[in-house]
Amino acid sequence: MSTENSADKQKLVSEVMELHRRVDNVLKPYVPDVWMELNLTVAQLKSLIFVVRGGKTSSKKLAAALRVTPSNVTGIVDRLVEQGFISREQNPEDRRALLLQPTDKGEAALSRLRYGIESHIAQVLQGMSVEELSVLVQGYSSLVRAGEEYEQSADREKELRNNEGCLGTSQGGIKDESD
């Protein structure tokens, strides 16, 4: 790639990032209205999203996802259980551990949140011409494709690193006893 193309590409990347921030700012004022209806703290909302996306999960996994200690998660989970958004059940594989799972109320709450945000975005999009929407669809399609390719590449690199680490060898698969 030539220096000019690289500079042009970087300029475009910067422009896309700035436009992304502006889109976020245009849509952001509506999001709190939908979120406030749930009467959840940020930590509770994050926890609910994690449990709904993951299905059954442990408090330990939730704590790791939130980057907090398991004892911090206990209070968050207690309040979500009290409000009926998630439930606890005994882990059949480890009777000492409990599994967290979303309730119908928890799943419905996130669906309402998603619907509220999506309906606002749809209203904004209605103000665009067919041509503008077509260009936006092309742009988003390209972004999704690039993101998927990036994730596949990152997954392959992670797998390669894991495989190299598992070998525990220094020379083509033969363990060197001097290591």
Image: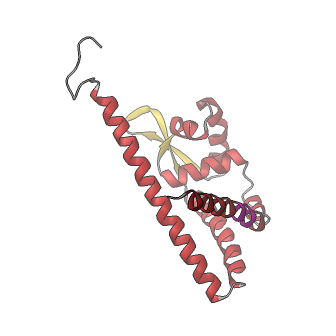
In front of the other: 107 or 64: 64
Asked if the stretch drawn in magenta spans residue 19, the answer is yes
Give the image location of residue 3, x and y in percent.
57, 56
Q: Is residue 130 left or right of residue 144?
A: right
**Residue at 51 percent of width and 38 percent of height:** 61
Asked if the stretch drawn in magenta spans residue 21, the answer is yes
Residue stretch rendered in magenta on the structure:
18-24
In front of the other: 82 or 156: 156
Which color scheme does this rendered protein use? secondary structure
Vertical position of residue 113 compared to residue 58: above or below: below
**Residue at 69 percent of width and 63 percent of height:** 15
Vertical position of residue 122 compared to residue 103: above or below: below
**Residue that extends furthest to the bottom in the rendered view of this protein:** 130
Magenta-highlighted stretch: main secondary structure?
Answer: helix
Residue 13 sits in quarter: bottom right
**Residue at 72 percent of width and 67 percent of height:** 23
Q: Quadrant of the image for the C terminus?
A: top left
Residue 11 sits in quarter: bottom right
In front of the other: 163 or 70: 163
Q: Is residue 113 left or right of residue 137?
A: right
Give the image location of residue 116, x and y in percent.
68, 70
Give the image location of residue 135, x and y in percent.
59, 80
